Structures are given as structure tokens and as C-alpha cells.
Image (tube, rainbow, N blue to C red):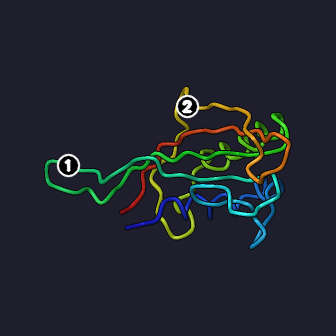
């Protein structure tokens, strides 16, 4: 089974509009499920698979899977979080390429009404607030 979370992170790390903000290569600040422990650097992205499953037809499994992916964009200001979120949406939905890393992609769409944002205590334990913007995506890909 394809790891769609890792594939999404690979896609973000391969998109210059995103890496110009979160860094590139092994220094890229994009992680699965939560902000990496001891990370003291914003901005960053967190990618989570929230649901999904195998696509079934009357003849059985179609060979496709679907997943709901949420990407949180974290930054030191609301404007920076919103800007990173916009770059993420464009990276994942504009001119969808057939592969993200080694995963064959059928479709990726940002879910209408799924975007939200907020302020949280600094995840690094500092005394400043951190800001986040989150968008959910429906992704169809080869199993």
C-alpha cells in the first residue's frame, strides 16, 4: 500500500514555492502528524492522513485508494501562515502531476470550506504564539 502522507511531503519538498519558505533537502521543515520534537524553526508544514480507504466497484477493488489529507502550515505570524497555506494549496492542486514521489496520483482537490486557521501556544515551549492555517485535500491514488 502506498504511503500517501510520505508522498504528499515529497511533493511539498519538490515544490520551489514551498521550499523557499520551509527549507529544502534534509533541512526542509515538513513532517508527518506533528511538529518534529525540538524544532525551533517556523515556518513549517505538518501533513496528516485523517481518513481514507480502498475504492470498490461491483467487480471488486478498483486499484485506487482515496484519502483525506490535512496540511497545517505553521508560522510566526498569521500572514506568513496564510501565505504558506496558499503555496501548499497551489503545490498540491495546480496542474496535478501523475506522481508524487513514487505514488501514482489520479486526483487531488482542496475541499471547499475546509480551510481554517488559528493561534496556538508556541509548540517549541517558547512564550510567543504560533499561527497555523489548515486545508483538507481529497486525494485519489494507485493502491
Which image quadrant is residue 130 in?
top right
**Residue sitting at 85 percent across and 44 percent down?**
127
Left or right of 58? Residue 94 is right
Q: Specify the label residue 127 is tagged with.
A: none
Total count of labels: 2
Left or right of 125? Residue 5 is left
The residue sitting at the left extreme is 59
**Residue sitting at 58 percent across and 59 percent down?**
32
Q: Distance between the Cα atoms at labels 2 and 1? A: 28 Å
**Residue sitting at 68 percent across and 32 percent down?**
117
Residue 78 image offset from top left, x and y in percent = 81, 34
- Quadrant for the N terminus in the image: bottom left
- Residue nearest the viewer, comparing 6 with 129: 129
The earlier-in-sequence mark between 2 and 1 is 1
**Residue sitting at 76 percent across and 38 percent down?**
131
112 is higher (above) or lower (below) than 143: above
The residue sitting at the bottom extreme is 26
Residue 75 image offset from top left, x and y in percent = 80, 45
Which residue does the numbered mark 2 point to in the structure image? 114
81 is higher (above) or lower (below) than 39: above
* Circle 1 SS class: strand
Mark 2 against mark 1, which lies toward the viewer? Answer: 2
Asked if the residue at tag 1 contacts the one at tag 2, i.e. Cβ–Cβ closer than 8 Å, the answer is no
Residue 107 image offset from top left, x and y in percent = 47, 48
Which residue does the numbered mark 1 point to in the structure image? 57
Circle 1: is it few (<14), some (14-19), or many (20+) Cα within 10 Å?
few
Residue 143 image offset from top left, x and y in percent = 36, 63
Circle 2: is it few (<14), some (14-19), or many (20+) Cα within 10 Å?
few
* Circle 2 SS class: loop
93 is higher (above) or lower (below) than 24: above
Left or right of 119? Residue 58 is left
Which image quadrant is residue 141 in?
bottom left
Amino acid at each position: 500500500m502506498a504511503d500517501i502522507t510520505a508522498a504528499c511531503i515529497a511533493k511539498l519538498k519538490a515544490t520551489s514555492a514551498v521550499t523557499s519558505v520551509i527549507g529544502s533537502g534534509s533541512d526542509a521543515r515538513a513532517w508527518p502528524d506533528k511538529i518534529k520534537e525540538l524544532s525551533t524553526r517556523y515556518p513549517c508544514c505538518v501533513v496528516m492522513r485523517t481518513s481514507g480507504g480502498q475504492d470498490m466497484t461491483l467487480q471488486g477493488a478498483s486499484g485506487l485508494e482515496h484519502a483525506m489529507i490535512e496540511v497545517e502550515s505553521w508560522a510566526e505570524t498569521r500572514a506568513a501562515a496564510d501565505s504558506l497555506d496558499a503555496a501548499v494549496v497551489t503545490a498540491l492542486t495546480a496542474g496535478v502531476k501523475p506522481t508524487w514521489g513514487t505514488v501514482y496520483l489520479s486526483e487531488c482537490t482542496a475541499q471547499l470550506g475546509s480551510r481554517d486557521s488559528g493561534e496556538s501556544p508556541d509548540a517549541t515551549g517558547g512564550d510567543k504564539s504560533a499561527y497555523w492555517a489548515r486545508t483538507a485535500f481529497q486525494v485519489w491514488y494507485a493502491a
